[in-house]
Amino acid sequence: MGRSMDTGALDRVLTAAVERGAVPHIAAVAADRDGVIYEGGAGPRTVGESGTVDGGTQFRIMSMTKMVATTAALQLREAGKLDFDTPVADILPEFADVQVLDGFDGDTPRLRAPKTPATVRNLVTHTSGLGYWFFEADIARYEKVTGIPNVLGGAGAFAAPMVHDPGERFTYGINTDWLGKVVEAVAGAGLDVVIKENITGPLGMDDTMFLLDGRRTANAVTVHVPGETGGWSSAGELLPQQPDWWAGGHGLYSTPRDYLRFQRALLRDGELDGERILRPETVEEAFSNQIGALDFPAEIPTTDPPITAEFNAGPGWKWGYGLLLNTADVPGGRRAGSGAWAGLFNSHFWIDRTTGVCASVYTNSLPFVLPETFAVYGEFEQALYASI
């Protein structure tokens, strides 16, 4: 176990969030380098049911999958099997078909070849030009006029074009799904196997996987959306249970307790309980600015309000390898250089190597970053730092 602390204030943050309807349910965990320092939960797995979620409840972690898939790519780089400066099409010939969308003539997309080939590094740092429909109006329109599915709908999503040339700016999108395919091609195995053998297996993360069995399904929350008459309504399962590919960008289920082990390994420079998943110097790179003079966007408007609200990160954010990095201390919270990210169904994590703590907050609800939901994340962070 880690340091002792007063957990009452943290419990109250979670309970109050459920009571005022900011979330349908919420679980949160925190740890330092020595062990778990907090675990709590409030609200049932599905509204109207009994019971309370906790650190052992299954959640869809969505884009929190990205750091796991990125770690798999970093492991291949450490082994000398993957050079991040390799053009993606050299590994995946089908990537050569990905074009840049330069607008529309009526309902006809205008496509052209990218000025420079996208590299694996562009995928890892979200600088390839690939976007998501819920943040990129042109991608939403392209999917509508061409009939290709979005990334939750099937493998046709890989036909989506870039919205700008590689290296031009940071654009959050399906990069890590392509990166997962790169990992599979280089490793010669499915992403599910690569992650199990090299990350979740060694770390004892037995409840982290792409598809749940019956027992774990029964222990999973359902995804909730705002009810027509207020409150929350269960939307059930939104992820495909016979997926076309193992989605490195969003496919994993996990528990707060499990994912905390992954966070602690990163907090401890790549090692936990004698198992090393990354070298210390690689972890240092992951927590360092990898996009140079580019910035993570201060504001990202929504193009699909039922899926996500506008994401207002504010200025001063960079991107490492799989991690959003704050360049200034958060008053009363994480220190500069912390690494963080989130999942579309409102799960969030951060790793503060300066203070020596990591934590995560979980619910499964839409829209993403709804202001009243997102506020709970900040409240928990503030209460955690005040208690340590």
Image: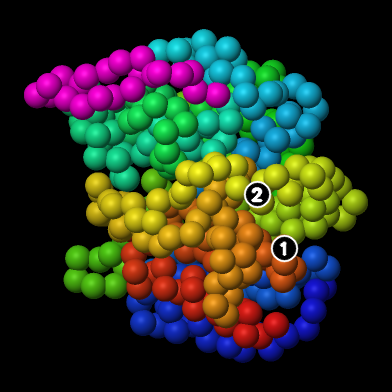
Report the number of discs: 2
Q: Please, is residue 49 above or below residue 258 in the view?
A: below
Q: Is residue 43 left or right of residue 232?
A: right
Q: Amino acid at mark 2?
A: Ser
Q: Is residue 384 left or right of residue 45?
A: right
Measuring 31% from the left and 57% from the top, which residue is drawn there?
310
Where is mark 2, residue-wise?
A: 288
The span shown in magenta is 99-119
Residue 60 falls within the magenta-colored stretch:
no
Q: Which numbered marker is on residue 12?
A: none
Where is mark 1, residue-wise?
A: 353
| Residue closer to the observer: 76 or 197 | 76
Measuring 47% from the left and 63% from the top, which residue is drawn there?
363
Instruction: Please rate how many residues cluster around mark 1, counting C-alpha atoms within 10 Å: few if below 14, some from 14 to 19, many from 20.
Output: many
| Residue closer to the observer: 309 or 87 | 87
Evaluate whether residue 371 shows in this view.
Answer: yes
Q: Disc 1 versus disc 2: distance between alpha carbons?
A: 12 Å
Q: Quadrant of residue 359?
A: bottom right
Residue 128, horizontal then vertical, whole percent: 46, 30
Q: Quadrant of residue 261?
A: bottom right
Residue 308, horizontal then vertical, whole percent: 32, 54
Q: Amino acid at mark 1?
A: Arg
Of mark 1 and mark 2, the one earlier in the sequence is 2
Residue 85, horizontal then vertical, whole percent: 62, 24
